[in-house]
Structure formats: C-alpha cells, structure tokens
Image (cartoon, helix red, strand yellow):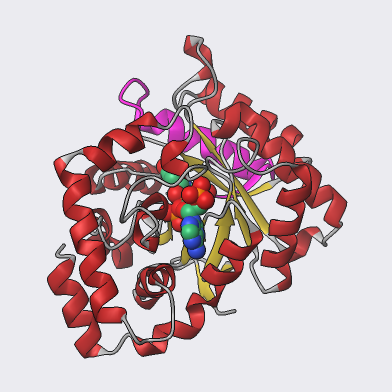
Amino acid sequence: MQYRRLGSSGLQLSVLSFGSWVTFSKQVDQQLAQQLMTHAYDNGVNFFDNAEVYAQGEAEILMGQALKHAGWGRDTYCVSSKVFWGGEKPTQRGLSKKHVHDACHAALKRLQVDYLDLFFCHRPDPNTPVHETVFAMNDLIAQGKILYWGTSEWKPNQLIEAYKVASRYRLRGPAMEQPEYNLFNRRNMEVDLVPIMHTYGLGTTVWSPLCSGMLTGKYQSGIPSGSRFSLNGYEWLTDRYHSEVGQARIEQVAKLGDITHGMGCSLAQVAIAWCIKNPHVSTVLLGASNVEQLKENMASLAVVDQLDDALMAELNGIFPV
Ligand code: NDP
C-alpha cells in the first residue's frame, strides 16, 4: 500500500480506500462486510467511507459492527460520514447547524466510534448560509467529535466562499473534497478543483473510479443479473446505460479493451491505476460487492507503473476531459 497526505494536512491516507455506497446492506451482509473490510485493512487500507444516507443509516450500522468485531486500534484507521440527506423532515436534511450536529451524533452512534476522522457535507445546501455550516463543522472539531471536515461535489466558488468565512473568523476550512473521478468524468477534478487545491491545501477522496462498474467491461453486452445496474432503486443507472451517453461509453470501453489488451491486467485495474496516477488524488474510494472484486481492484497498485506516457496519451484520446 502507498500512503498520501490528505492535501496539506498531516493525515496519511492509504491511496486505496473502501466505501459502502449501494453495497452495504443491499448486497453485502454483516459477515461479508466483515470479510471485505478485513481484507482491505490487512492489505493496508486505513480509510473506510460512509454517509448517513447510505441504506438510510444501515450501511453505517454494518460498518460499525464490523469495526467493533475486528477490534482494530482506533488509532490505526479512519472512518467518515457525510451529512445532507438524513430523512424527509425539513430538520433532517441539508447543512443547517442543527442537522450537521444531529447527523454527526447519529453517525457516531451507528458507527460505534467516539469521533469521525472525516466528515463531509455531501452536497452544497443553497438554503443554509455557508458561514452557518463552517461554524457548525468547527464546533464539532472543537468538541473532538470530528477531526477534518470537507465537502462533496462542491464547485470552486462554493469552496472559496467557505475558505473566506474560515479565514475571516480564524476557523478551519474544508480539508478535502470528494468528487466523482474516473475516465468518463474528469472535469470536476482536473478543470475545477486542481487550480485551487494548492492554494487552500485541499485533498481529494475520489469516488466511483469504475463509474459504478461500467469501466470493468461487464456491461459490454448487456446488464448482467445481480450487477449494480440491475438492482431495484438504481433504475437511473439503467436509464443512463441505455441513453446515448451510455452507448457512447460502451464504445469507449471497447477501445480501452483494445489498447490494454496484452497488459496482463483487467480493465478495472487500468481504470483504477489511472486514478492513482493522478498526484492530486489523495485516495481512491473503491467499491466492491464481493471479495474477488476487492482483491482484483486492490491489485491495481501494481499496474500504475505500466501507465507510461504513450499509454496515457492513448487514454486521453479515448477519454477526453
Ligand atoms: P465503483 O465505481 O468502483 O463501483 C463499484 C461497483 O462496481 C461494485 O460495487 C461492483 O458492483 C462493481 N465492481 C467493482 N469492481 C469490480 C470488478 N473488479 N469486476 C466487476 N465488477 C466490479 O465505486 P462506487 O460507485 O461503489 O464508489 C466507491 C465509493 O465512493 C462508495 O462506496 C462511496 O464510499 C463513495 N461514493 C461517494 C459519493 C459521493 O457523492 N460523495 C457517490 C458515490 C460513491 P456490482 O458487483 O454490483 O456490479
């Protein structure tokens, strides 16, 4: 495993980390969650990602049970949660001081930990003044409930507004942003975030490196049963797959297969290695519905050196920014 600093913070995260969206509770039960997290941890992963909205809190409950059962020293791993979609009532959503406070305490309970290492604003909230959220996050830091706070899918102007508030009141601004980043979706990271990352010491914990599995090649001739695109509740993924964009992606993946043929690794490994290769990425959040996938994906580290300038240029040609 390799470890990278989270932006300009002193926190060293494993460059591959493990998340629970879609999988925990829907596809992965307690026993499998335990196996997946143990495999990750035993191979150097030190960051586990979660959110209040994942399976409406059930994903955090499973992760909390797995952490408790594993008995790893609390100083040997990091765990996160995200606040935004906590429930249907107006006070259960968004980034008000109340919901940030309630969501953090509920996550601590479900995860069975005394503090969260990373706590994310899952989306920007147009209905809460940003200074209210910055103060709420800093209160949680002062109380020792969270160590670092960050954002997910915030635009540069929204991040800069948060940094201005933080600087004016001598508070902590976002330490990390969590954007989608994969061969299909490069703009958020490469165009929007990179220009401001250095100025603000921002780290990135990037999500969906395989674009929900599309980049594994498993969807090249239809939707396999049991795969993410076949799950109830994820029809939007199926719709996207059948759209013009989805069909264009099938062609891009076919070309990826052509140029990586003979490399002795899988498409998934090339796609993940490509994310790792970007030095602006602090950690790549992996997702897996079984141990074989996780083993395959973790072996991507060994593929990074094969991505030389010529191959990167070919990838840029197929997957432009
Ligand atoms: P990926 O894009 O890597 O998709 C993972 C899924 O792809 C797996 O669950 C599995 O689905 C399939 N898959 C993975 N590896 C393989 C393989 N080797 N062969 C075949 N199929 C494979 O990541 P996720 O979308 O799961 O995102 C990772 C994490 O990022 C999440 O758990 C979460 O922590 C975070 N995230 C954050 C978001 C945010 O808004 N901040 C949004 C989304 C994710 P299956 O077997 O079911 O087909």
Q: Work out whether 315 lies above or below 175.
A: below
Judged left or right of residue 59, residue 309 is left
**Residue 148 belongs to the span the image colors magenta:** yes
Q: Work out whether 238 lies above or below 273.
A: above
Q: Residue 221: horizontal and vertical position, in percent?
A: 31, 53
Query: Residue 64 is drawn in which quadrant?
Result: top right
Indicate the quadrant containing the N terminus: top left, top right, bottom left or bottom right. bottom right
Q: Work out whether 24 lies above or below 15.
A: above
Q: Residue 204: horizontal and vertical position, in percent?
A: 41, 60
- Counting every numbered tag in the picture gives 0
Q: Residue at x 70, y 61 (%)?
A: 77
Query: Residue 210 is drawn in which quadrant?
Result: bottom left
Indicate the quadrant containing the C terminus: top left, top right, bottom left or bottom right. bottom left
Q: Residue at x 26, y 44 (%)?
A: 155
Q: Residue at x 32, y 43 (%)?
A: 154
User: Which residue range is magenta in the image?
Assistant: 124-149
Judged left or right of residue 270, residue 295 is right
Q: Is residue 151 visible?
A: no
Nearest the viewer among 19 and 150 is 19
Q: Residue at x 58, y 67 (%)?
A: 11
Q: Residue 19: horizontal and vertical position, in percent?
A: 56, 51
Nearest the viewer among 272 and 48 is 272
Judged left or right of residue 220, residue 293 is right
Q: Is residue 199 visible?
A: yes
